[in-house]
Image (spheres, rainbow, N blue to C red):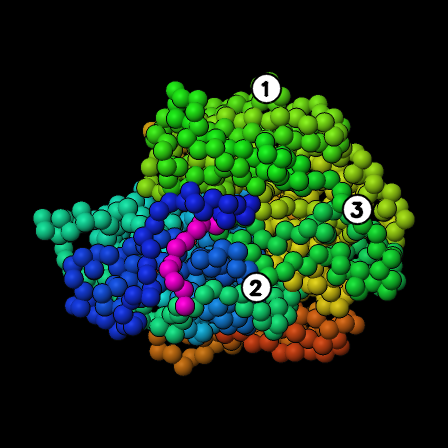
């Protein structure tokens, strides 16, 4: 039995245990003294205060509940790639591959299996609500959170999400798909306005469509609103979005919660329909709301409705309520499933000279740090602590006939920020490994606190240390560094406040920090960086001193203010030497595997990337190593498409390896050695260059003269593959992926049911044969695209309307049948009637290279899901 519930937030760099004594003081729930849990209370049982109380969080992961009646708090945690806990952030979890990899499987059944296992993982963390999946789309290759999303296509994203939601909820755990809606960019995510009408075709046919598809096929118990505005109003208080579309047209009756610190008002958000403000303690649902009820500004019925929804969520999640300690559930079947998801999601993009699959007797050179230290996820709330980490190099060696035939070199460094200074190289004044930290009130040279930290960081989260005067203090970190090598080393810090760095009492760097936000600390360490290059000698002690001022956040959302300083350091190293070492190994091998790509430092919640290129050092390494290799295979870790123009002709094979979760090493080895044939298909188009992306000119938000951040969706419904691509602009298309065998799709037949008297319910049955004409077993994704031959509005040339993944043994054929409905297959959003419209006429149905034509006899309109 847990004694008390407290919370910590997920801090980067595993520092949360070091700062616990400085963390924000939160309300503590004493579970021991709660009455026995009661799940079936009605609003009428609650006092006015309790009705208000239940509408917000108590801390980062729990809602308030109603202690007097035993209505338990809800525990809500991230996410669908790994279920994080709260009490012990370090309690590991099974880590599945990133959502982009799940998307590339195109396998609805697999997503259901993942959901079943996630429910068990969530229960092992005593969580009732799982915050996911993400329904936002891959709009632009710079999107920081694209790795968390399934696809650029609303049908694929919506179908996969529905399958997962149904399975998680069948396991007794509620889901909370996020972020409703338009959160396709992280730049100024708390502020930007997506200037698109909710009654416009772009919103309806693209961004809302993913939600519509999901809600047609599943009933998530909760939905999380997005941070951004749509059409000028924050999503958490947007009546058009919540009342008209979600609750009205789609008749959704689950609970709505805000993204963390995404509730921006009291009465407007309550009136618009936002049930839960997260996290807690509340900012907008204080007793002031009760005054508004008394004054008649807020109708009590609104509070009743919101409270009823939260009580309903508590009731629905009765099965997963638990007071047990969080544990790490080891589930061998789930590990095998995670491996299967990874093998099914890896996309073979190029395979010249049939370099893949490898033969077990080949001598291999394995280059790149991702082979020994893989990125299993992007960064931010989706990153969870794995139960174990497979190193691809080990799994490759295990499948090789002779492990000695597999040589490795680390290649160039792939960091984006300078790492923290290694603890064994720093010494506090008493000689122990660590730093001295002294906190001063301004005007006094007597420290209020003088202490030693074993890690090179000092963080105050939410409250300043006792004895310090708010905004009139500073703090100082000092330590002695002993370099291992001689050279021009990078030394500096990451600080939230303005600072000065001194080495041997001489100032080497300083920075004025303005407008630092909590999100910079959580997600954008680059913004906190201050660096100098200092010539240092191996074995010689250097005294480092860092003086940091407090800071004021640029805006107040009510979230805890963070004061933080960390020492960073990297000894000089040479890309050229690293590349030369890699080249030497490559020359001796039959095949070189080059691991390159991104890490959570490059793709993360909290920021968008600036471009879609690899760092120049990686490009240089790929080219040099490929040139020295007999055969080469490029393994790309990434959640987003990468501009491969500089090197795609230099390498023989290319694998899109996403971020592969804790079983990624085995999965990669299986694909490389042909134990599984690749069957992943891109769930997002890969432009040749960033400029070729249809969203290029409209993304991300920019600041206008009124100081607000605006983003349009200028490419309209022509997002992703719906754009008019040409071979000059498109590197690899949506839906593309090679395998080790060949498939032929034949005998396409399309028939229509005439059973329905309602024209829009007419069904279209699409049948085809899929033959595996190669020599190994494999799986193919049958994709059905619709083309409107003549339309009164301009429509994309093709739209995905159905798909099925099917396994076919070598030399065999399987029949595939996919059923669509006229209404979903042929309609577009008609802005004048604010309804979906299907125009009479011809529609082409494309499956592979085959096409059939269907004729719709009469126009019809429809609305709803
Ligand atoms: C993210 C959400 C996440 C929440 C809780 C927010 O910053 O946008 O996706 O569920 O934090 O961690």
Task: Give the alpha-carbon distance from disc 3 to disc 2, as whole Å.
Answer: 29 Å
Relative to 258, residue 714 above or below: above
Q: Position of residue 498 (x, y in %)?
A: 47, 26
Q: Provide the residue designation for mark 1.
A: 505
Q: Nearer the viewer, residue 497 or 839?
A: 497
Q: Residue at x 83, y 63 (%)?
A: 400
Dot 1: few (<14), some (14–19), or many (≥20) neighbours within 10 Å? few
Task: Give the alpha-carbon distance from disc 1 to disc 2, as whole Å.
Answer: 48 Å
The numbered mark at residue 667 is: none
Q: Residue at x 65, y 58 (%)?
A: 389
Query: Residue at the bottom extreme?
Result: 755
Is residue 486 on the magenta stretch? no
Q: Nearer the viewer, residue 817 or 378?
A: 378
Label 1 with label 2: CB-CB less than 8 Å: no
Q: Provide the residue designation for mark 2.
A: 94
Residue 104 seen from this side? no
Stretch in magenta: 1-12
| Left or right placement of residue 208 versus residue 285 in this view | right
Residue 535 seen from this side? yes
| Left or right placement of residue 469 versus residue 612 in this view | left
Q: Secondary structure at mark 2?
A: loop
The mark that comes first in sequence, 3 or 2, is 2
Q: Quadrant of the C terminus?
A: bottom left
Q: Provide the residue designation for mark 3.
A: 409
Q: Secondary structure at mark 1?
A: loop
Q: Position of residue 367 (x, y in %)?
A: 77, 48
Main SS of residues in magenta: loop
């Amino acid at each position: 039995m847990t004694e008390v519930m407290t919370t910590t937030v997920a801090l980067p760099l595993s520092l949360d245990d070091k700062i616990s004594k400085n963390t924000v003081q939160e309300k503590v729930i004493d579970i021991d003294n709660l009455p026995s849990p009661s799940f079936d209370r009605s609003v009428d049982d609650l006092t006015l205060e309790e009705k208000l109380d239940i509408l917000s969080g108590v801390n980062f992961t729990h809602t308030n509940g109603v202690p007097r009646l035993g209505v338990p708090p809800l525990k809500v945690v991230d996410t669908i790639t790994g279920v994080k806990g709260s009490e012990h952030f370090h309690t590991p979890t099974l880590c599945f591959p990133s959502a982009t990899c799940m998307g590339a499987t195109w396998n609805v059944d697999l997503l259901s299996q993942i959901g079943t296992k996630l429910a068990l993982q969530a229960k092992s963390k005593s969580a009732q609500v799982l915050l996911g999946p993400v329904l936002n789309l891959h709009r632009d290759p710079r999107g920081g959170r694209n790795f968390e999303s399934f696809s650029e296509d609303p049908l694929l994203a919506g179908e996969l999400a529905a399958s997962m939601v149904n399975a998680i909820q069948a396991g007794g755990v509620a889901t909370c798909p996020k972020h409703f809606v338009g959160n396709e960019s992280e730049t100024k995510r708390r502020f930007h306005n997506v200037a698109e009408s909710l009654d416009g075709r772009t919103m309806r046919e693209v961004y809302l469509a993913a939600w519509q598809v999901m809600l047609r096929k599943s009933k998530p118990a909760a939905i999380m609103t997005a941070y951004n505005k749509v059409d000028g109003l924050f999503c958490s208080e947007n009546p058009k979005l919540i009342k008209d579309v979600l609750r009205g047209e789609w008749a959704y009756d689950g609970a709505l919660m805000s993204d963390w610190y995404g509730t921006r008002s009291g009465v407007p958000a309550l009136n618009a329909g936002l049930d839960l403000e997260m996290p807690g303690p509340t900012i907008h649902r204080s007793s002031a709301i009760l005054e508004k009820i008394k004054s008649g500004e807020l109708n009590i019925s609104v509070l009743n409705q919101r409270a009823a929804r939260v009580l309903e969520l508590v009731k629905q999640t009765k099965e997963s309520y638990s007071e047990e300690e969080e544990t790490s559930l080891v589930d061998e079947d789930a590990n095998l499933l995670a491996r299967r998801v990874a093998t099914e999601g890896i996309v073979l993009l190029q395979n010249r000279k049939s370099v893949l699959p490898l033969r077990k007797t080949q001598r291999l050179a394995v280059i790149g740090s991702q082979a020994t230290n893989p990125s299993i996820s992007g960064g931010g709330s989706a990153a969870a602590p794995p139960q174990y980490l497979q190193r691809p190099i080990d799994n490759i060696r295990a499948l090789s006939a002779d492990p000695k035939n597999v040589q490795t070199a680390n290649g160039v460094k792939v960091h984006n920020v300078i790492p923290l200074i290694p603890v064994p190289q720093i010494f506090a004044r008493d000689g122990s490994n660590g730093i001295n930290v002294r906190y001063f009130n301004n005007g006094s040279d007597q420290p209020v606190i003088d202490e030693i930290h074993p890690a090179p960081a000092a963080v105050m989260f939410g409250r300043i240390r006792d004895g310090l005067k708010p905004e009139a203090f500073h703090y100082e970190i000092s330590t002695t560094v002993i370099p291992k090598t001689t050279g021009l080393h990078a030394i500096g810090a990451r600080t939230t406040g303005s600072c000065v760095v001194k080495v041997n009492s001489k100032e080497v760097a300083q920075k004025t920090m303005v407008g630092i936000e909590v999100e910079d600390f959580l997600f954008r360490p680059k913004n906190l960086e201050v660096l100098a290059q200092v010539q240092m000698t191996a074995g010689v002690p250097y005294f480092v001193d860092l003086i940091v001022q407090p800071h004021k956040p640029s805006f107040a959302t009510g979230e805890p203010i963070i004061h933080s300083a960390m020492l960073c350091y990297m000894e000089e190293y040479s890309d050229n030497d690293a590349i030369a070492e890699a080249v030497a190994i490559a020359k001796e091998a039959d095949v070189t595997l080059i691991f390159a790509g991104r890490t959570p430092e490059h793709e993360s919640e909290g920021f968008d990337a600036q471009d879609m290129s690899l760092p120049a050092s990686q490009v240089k390494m790929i080219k040099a190593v490929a040139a020295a290799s007999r055969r080469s295979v490029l393994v790309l870790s990434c959640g987003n498409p990468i501009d491969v123009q500089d090197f795609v002709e230099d390498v023989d094979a290319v694998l899109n390896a996403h971020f592969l979760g804790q079983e990624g090493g085995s999965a990669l080895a299986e694909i490389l050695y042909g134990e599984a044939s690749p069957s992943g298909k891109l769930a997002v188009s890969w432009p040749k260059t960033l400029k070729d992306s249809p969203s290029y000119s409209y993304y991300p938000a920019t600041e206008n003269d009124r100081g607000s951040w605006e983003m349009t969706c200028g490419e309209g419904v022509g997002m992703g593959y719906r754009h008019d691509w040409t071979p000059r602009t498109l590197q690899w298309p949506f839906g593309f992926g090679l395998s080790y065998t060949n498939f032929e799709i034949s005998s396409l037949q399309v028939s229509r049911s005439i059973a329905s008297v309602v024209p829009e319910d007419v069904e279209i049955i699409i049948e085809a044969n899929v033959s595996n004409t190669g020599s190994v077993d494999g799986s193919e994704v049958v994709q059905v695209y619709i083309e409107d031959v003549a339309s009164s509005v301009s429509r994309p040339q093709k739209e995905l309307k159905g798909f099925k993944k099917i396994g076919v043994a070598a030399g065999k054929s399987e029949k595939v049948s996919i059923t669509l409905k006229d209404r979903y297959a042929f309609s577009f959003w008609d802005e004048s009637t604010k309804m979906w419209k299907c125009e009479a006429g011809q529609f082409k149905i494309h499956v592979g290279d085959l096409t059939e034509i269907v004729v719709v006899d009469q126009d019809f309109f429809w609305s709803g899901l």
